Image (cartoon, grey):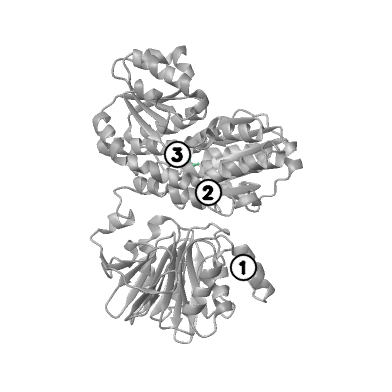
Amino acid sequence: MCGIVGYIGDKNAVPILMEGLRKLEYRGYDSAGVAVYTKENIEVRKYKGRLSVLEEHLKKETLDGSLGIGHTRWATHGEPSDVNSHPHTNCSGDIAVVHNGIIENYMSIKSMLIEKGYTFRSETDTEVLAHYVDYFYKDDLLEAVTKVLEKIRGSYAFAVISRREPDKIICVRKENPLIVGIGNGENFIASDIPAILNHTRRIYLLNENELAVIKKDRISFFDESGKEVGKEVFEVNWDVAAAEKGGFEHFMIKEIHEQPKAVKDTMTSRVLPDSAGIKLDDIKLTKEELQNFNKIYMVACGTAYHACMVGKYVIEKLARIPVEVEIASEFRYRDPIVDEKTLTIIVSQSGETLDTLAALKEARRKGSRILSIVNVVGSSIARESHDVLYTWAGPEIAVASTKAYTTQLIAIYIIALYMAKLKGTLKDEEIESIKDEMRRLPELVEETLKYKSTIQKFATHNSNARDIFYLGRGIDYAVALEGSLKLKEISYIHSEAYAAGELKHGTIALIENGTIVLAVLTQDELYEKMVSNVKEVKARGAFVFALAKEGSTEVEKVADYTLYIPKVSDILAPVVAVMPLQLLAYYMAVEKGCDVDKPRNLAKSVTVE
Ligand code: AGP
């Protein structure tokens, strides 16, 4: 997620903007910039890298002005670079924009504006906004912005200033947060409360599709129809630490809650409406190239590896291409059989995991084509790959990966459907049906959050468990692995995940009276077998927490506790089923007083052997 700040008043804007951007640094970013109205012009200073780079330049040449906007960028469209940093301006430089989110139809607007003679400098979707406001501008900035809003699609929060109307900031919010801070003879805007907490605790929250015109002594709000609306003042009583977490106790629970949006964002401009099909961004993978591959390796570490485990089931089922899943630290040293007929899919949230990067280089050295699924634009793994499909989860701060995992699954579904379409292994109507259901995933993920208190209660009663075993069959086995890792890494409770069919080959010897077993039963075709496995462990005294789909009530007769997730097709179930497992791990860790966001011995990005 990008960070937006803005100021209009009588003080010098730059120190206020820089302080606000520093307060948003925790969100993660790769570049930063400011635009200030300095009586004659709008001056823009923007650079790739840390805020200190921008600060150094601003020290050398201060900008005096009391109207300004600032931005920390988390790249989605276009690599981190000075020219791709925000703010972006129109050709004459008298309109500046900062933006958070994704303008879905920016390419078609950009083509139209280029035809009209506009010249673009960056690869970003955001720059379109600056030129588009210019395109509609006659003599009223509010009118021009309103016309832009009628044309753009996507999820966005953006702010606009203009040399022609230097008495205001206009900002808009759609599915991305934006707040207005109320001062005395001055006003502020920000993506997040921490940015302005030192100046005011009185804020307005913009609602969906609302537009605000912020002057130093007057703030007006307009709804989607252009009607002026009133607004309650919200008094912020959080401290800075709580504000950084959006009021949540930990980043992990905040990021668990961000999953509906992250899943939706990652589908944007890829899972296209109707029969427009599936788009892999600008990845060119032809039918001939795909037919040339006789094997796919999926290679990663930790949670990303578990996403690959799901990927194997999904790609083999939909595209009928053999997939081997490998732990990167094993793959890189075993002289794997790889050549130009191999497609290696690398998955990594950080894009910097050393073992995964090394595995990538080994596969590429042997002639494999490399397609990576990465959350950090311009990261090492992204740069070393032939093709990258980015997840748009936004920065993931908690060490335990949650929204990165679910968006990795979305990326895998997109790739699998694209391959199935190329190979003709699925009919168009089958592809459309899966796409339709994928579009429902954000609401299904959201729905599972209603179990928070139920799961919290279960955690309260079971946080002193010595061992917790996770069982699943098929794709549920992959989900069980991820659930088990979440629990281990943040609550330090010993846990194992087993393919349920393996129990009788040894591990059932571990089950004794009171052993906690978490059984995942979302796969219709394996449901009866799983119920039998639940009976097996129950017969040895286990306490069973079952996770099943609504309507599959047979297991309730056997398990001690059954939680139902919304009905969803087997192949998409992992995106929904993992939610209760993430929540269980979280509440267990909280109950045990663990450092949830920074668990012992772990780092967010493992850049060592
Ligand atoms: C996940 O919760 C862990 N923090 C860890 O297993 C992580 O998934 C692994 O280190 C891989 O990281 P990456 O996705 O950044 O490559």
Which residue: 62% across, 51% down? 274
Identify the element where label 2 is drawn.
loop
Q: Which residue is denoted by mark 2 in the rendering?
A: 391
Identify the element where label 1 is drawn.
helix
Res. 392 visible in picture: no
Query: Which quadrant of the figure has residue 368?
Result: top right
Q: How many marks?
A: 3
Name which residue type carries label 3: Val
Q: Nearer the viewer, residue 543 or 52?
A: 543
Which of the two discs, 3 and 1, labels the residue nearer the N terminus? 1
Q: Is residue 569 above or below residue 256?
A: above
Disc number for residue 40 = none
Q: Percent x, y for residue 491? A: 32, 34
Q: Which residue is denoted by mark 3 in the rendering?
A: 576
Point out the frontmost of discs 2 and 1. Answer: 1
Which residue: 36% across, 62% down? 192
Q: Percent x, y for residue 196? A: 32, 67
Local packing at callout 2 (Cα closer than 10 Å; few below 14, some 14-19, many 20+) is many
Identify the element where label 3 is drawn.
helix
Disc number for residue 109 = 1
Name which residue type carries label 2: Thr
Distance CA(mark 3)–CA(mark 2): 17 Å
Name which residue type carries label 1: Ile
Which of the two discs, 2 and 1, labels the residue nearer the N terminus? 1
Which of the two discs, 3 and 2, labels the residue nearer the N terminus? 2
Q: Residue furthest right?
A: 288
Q: Percent x, y for residue 135? A: 59, 77
Is 60 placed left or right of 124 in the picture?
left
Distance CA(mark 2)–CA(mark 1): 24 Å
Q: Is residue 511 above or below residue 234?
A: above
Point out the frontmost of discs 3 and 2. Answer: 3
